[in-house]
Amino acid sequence: MKDFIFLGGDLRFIYAAAKLSERYDCGIFGFDKLEYPAFEILTEIRRAKNVILPLPMSRNCDYITAPYYSGKMPISDVVKAVGKGGSIYCGKACPIMNHICRDNGLTLVDYFEREELVVMNAAITAEGALEIIMREKARAIMDMSVLVMGYGRIAKVLSGHLKALGANVTVTARKFADLSWVRIAGCNAVHFDDVDDLLGGFDTIVNTVPAQVLDEGRLGRLRRDCLIVDLASKSCVASMEGVNVIWALSLPGKIAPITAGEIIADTIFNIINEKKGAGNL
């Protein structure tokens, strides 16, 4: 019985498996569309002590996310892959997974709840946003006027990078505490309720809020050559001619799968070490 089996996922999980296999016996299933001779890709599901599922584990809580697999893997297939009393590691667990684990005596660990992984993913996403901005605008970020919407982890990292590169950075948020931190970081701070009249002054707008913050009314205030980079969700209506909208979701797995995969593996290592320290492994 292997120590770990990976079921599905994108390229990140090939590299996560490769790093985890430096210490443990690992297998990976759900990549029959991909040739990767440096690592064994299983042709059938085998049982293991632990199962690692993708991030996100499922789009609609029905099938395991597996873009490189020619078939479909129902979520219930995890029971075929994990031994008695084993653990299932997943990203953004669906409610059904809680029931499956409870009914089969399995331990569920959502690695996406780990702060170290979320923070490092935010750093990769910020780097990817910079690349998109430079590519789409065909100019340097220096002296560019950029609005960052929201002030979560990604926005904190991104606004810092933009400022360091010489951009004129404005951040809009709803919490007054966030606006205070924005000012301390040396960026312009504007409350969401007060941003409308300023929208026409930006070369680029980066949205990090998972909600519709750019409606048609706000789009109508933008310059025709304004670039919108949406990192959180398809949260704006791109109906105005000339507005370039880039929906850049799940950037870590697309732009830096090696680094993103290694971060997932490192997070699994951290969880295992914590269990050992607590005497649970």
Image (cartoon, grey):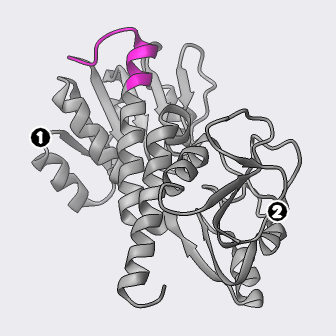
Residue 238 lies in the magenta stretch: no
**Residue 62's disc number:** 2
- Between 89 and 217, the one lying in front of the other is 89
Tally of marks:
2
Look at the picture and state if 36 lies above or below 203.
below
Quarter of the picture containing the N terminus is bottom right
Residue corresponding to mark 1: 186
Q: Could you give the CA–CA distance between mark 2 and mark 1, rounded to whole angstroms? A: 46 Å
- Between 49 and 118, the one lying in front of the other is 49
Q: Which residues are magenta?
A: 131-143
Whether residue 111 sits left or right of residue 46 in the image: it is left
Q: Horizontal and vertical percent for residue 281?
A: 49, 85
Q: Horizontal and vertical percent for residue 35?
A: 72, 32
Residue at the far right: name it: 71
Sequence-first tag of 2 and 1: 2
Residue 91, located in which quarter of the rendered image?
Answer: bottom right
